[in-house]
Amino acid sequence: MVVAEAGRAPKLIKVTGNSAVVSELPGDYTNPKAQQEAFQYPTEALAVNGGGFRLTNYQGRIYDVAVSGGAYDRVGPIQDTGLSQVLRSSYDISTDTWYLSDWGAFRIAAVRGTHQGDLTVKALGYSVLEALPVAGDGGKLYAVAQRMGADEADFGFFSWDQTGISPTITTQPTTPKVSLGLGDVSKTAVLTAAATGDPSPTLQWQTRPVGSTSPKAWTAIAGETSTSTTVSLTEADHGRQYRALVSNAAGQIATEAVVAEVQTAPAIVFQPESADVTEGDDAQFLVMPKGNPYPTITWQRRVGGYWQDLSDDDDNFVINGGTLTVKDSNADQSGSVFRARLRNDIATVYSRTVTLSVAEPSDAKRDVASGDLAWGVKESFRKYIGGPIAHGTTTVAGGASIADDGTFRFPVDSGSYDPKTKTLEVEYDGSVHFTGHAGALDLKISDPRVEITGDKGVLVADVVSKSLDSTELTTYDDVELAALDAKDALTAGADALRLVGVGAAAHRGGSACLRRFLPGRLRAR
């Protein structure tokens, strides 16, 4: 049994023989002033189908209570009926309906599961419900009410005929799942739903396209009106939604929507191609797979008649999912054979095999048509210009740009490379202009040029500058700004030159125009 007293903790008591187990709903009830608002003024607690109780309080909230850990405790979410002054409530076990009477809002709330309907007696001249509505007598509902402002003897007695019971879902559909193996185009899944109501409800299965959230997007599946339906699912149906719409004369309700899960074996959308490169070039192979779950990709190389997995630990390779890059290829690697293994929970497939062919580089002189020069000038100088002392600015023009790291990019204008003499000469466009100290400091570097022979080189540019102790701008053409150390920095491929990590030291030819502003490292490609 249940003992519920306004302002006190509701006691839930289970009696077995001569012993009883008593528990209170969660909360601190040792101090009456600490009574939780949600449980203040409990009004009724009645047994329900399936065991346990339903408890109501003055604010019109409903709590489901069941055995937990040997004692009764609240289970499931709290249901709020929207009522405000509930004095009495009752439960009709035959229809699984909970009735709550609102003392001040002139209405009765009928609650079944999570669904609620309201009856009002205000229009009949009776504004305050005093008595508990009772369900019974062939579907009739009775209630006693008092006329507002009248004495205690002025009561009204009301009854309602039950004309129907709106549908209630008793079985929700479950997620349809299929796995399409190699060669499978589709498979079927069964959806099942059930409902009760008076009169007996009809059922119509519906579907909604993948990704849609619009209520208007639901469409009926022709002819599917039984409690179970069989749907055929293809790869394209992953994410398609299904539900059943249940109706009778008393109302309409939809089941929960379920989303189809279609797992598929790996497949190859784009096969890798064999690569023909010149020694020193990177070679790249690309495979584009699909599958659900998305397949893991393992690149393999054939060695001694056996396939071996490749790893990022090997400095010769860069592996990024479906992309395999062979770095700085050499002639010894020519003839190497590769493939990609694609694997998920459904199956394992392999790409076609591809071959790497590496040719020795040509000795012919080549033109440099595109690329850029990356040069930071000097990081400390850049910070000084933008700092609190110089309060300066840095601007670029003529195609030059500033990278995210603060260094500068100058686009290629023209150039050439002679493999026989290992001579590189590239001219770049653009300028970078530094100013500070309210214009007292002024330095502009434009149209840089890189000249390298063997391991040594020089950075040349046109300079216009003004130091802090001079008020006149001076122009310097073709100034050798920096001596370059290009050892191991130049890589010549079939169609690309890379000059990376070149050391740059101040050249005495630039001392007059740069003063103490020394060069930094540079990179060209």
Image (cartoon, helix red, strand yellow):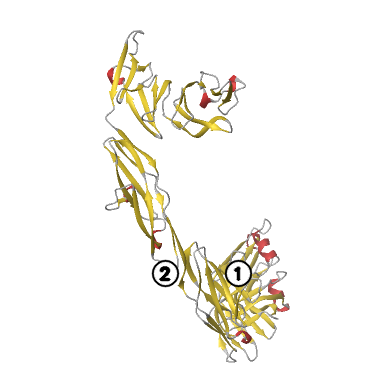
Q: Which of 206 and 127 is in front in this view?
A: 206
Q: Identify the amino acid type marked 1.
A: Phe
The CA span between labels 1 and 2 is 54 Å
Q: Name the residue under label 1.
A: 408
Mark nearest the camera among 1 and 2 is: 2
Q: Mark 2 points at which residue?
A: 183
Left or right: where 443 falls relative to 203? right
Q: Which of 199 and 329 is in front in this view?
A: 199
Q: Name the residue at 28% across, 32% down.
A: 164
Across and down, in percent, residue 318 comes to 60, 73
Q: Up-down: is 112 above or below 261?
A: above
Q: Which of 480 and 465 is in front in this view?
A: 480
Q: Quadrant of residue 12?
A: top right
Across and down, in percent, residue 71 comes to 57, 29
Left or right: where 6 falls relative to 498? left
Quarter the C terminus occupies: bottom right
Number of other residues with Cα within 10 Å of mark 1, as a class: few under 14, some 14 to 19, many 20 or more: many
Q: Name the residue at 42% across, 69% down.
A: 183
Q: Up-down: is 250 above or below 219?
A: above
Left or right: where 213 falls relative to 56? left
Q: Name the residue at 65% across, 88% down.
A: 422
* Earlier-in-chain disc, 1 versus 2: 2
Q: Quadrant of residue 11?
A: top right
Q: Which of 5 and 315 is in front in this view?
A: 5
Q: In which quarter of the image is residue 141?
A: top left
Across and down, in percent, residue 320 comes to 57, 69
Please say whether residue 213 is visible from this viewpoint.
no
Please say whether residue 153 is visible from this viewpoint.
yes
Q: Up-down: is 127 above or below 109?
A: above
Q: Identify the amino acid type marked 2.
A: Gly
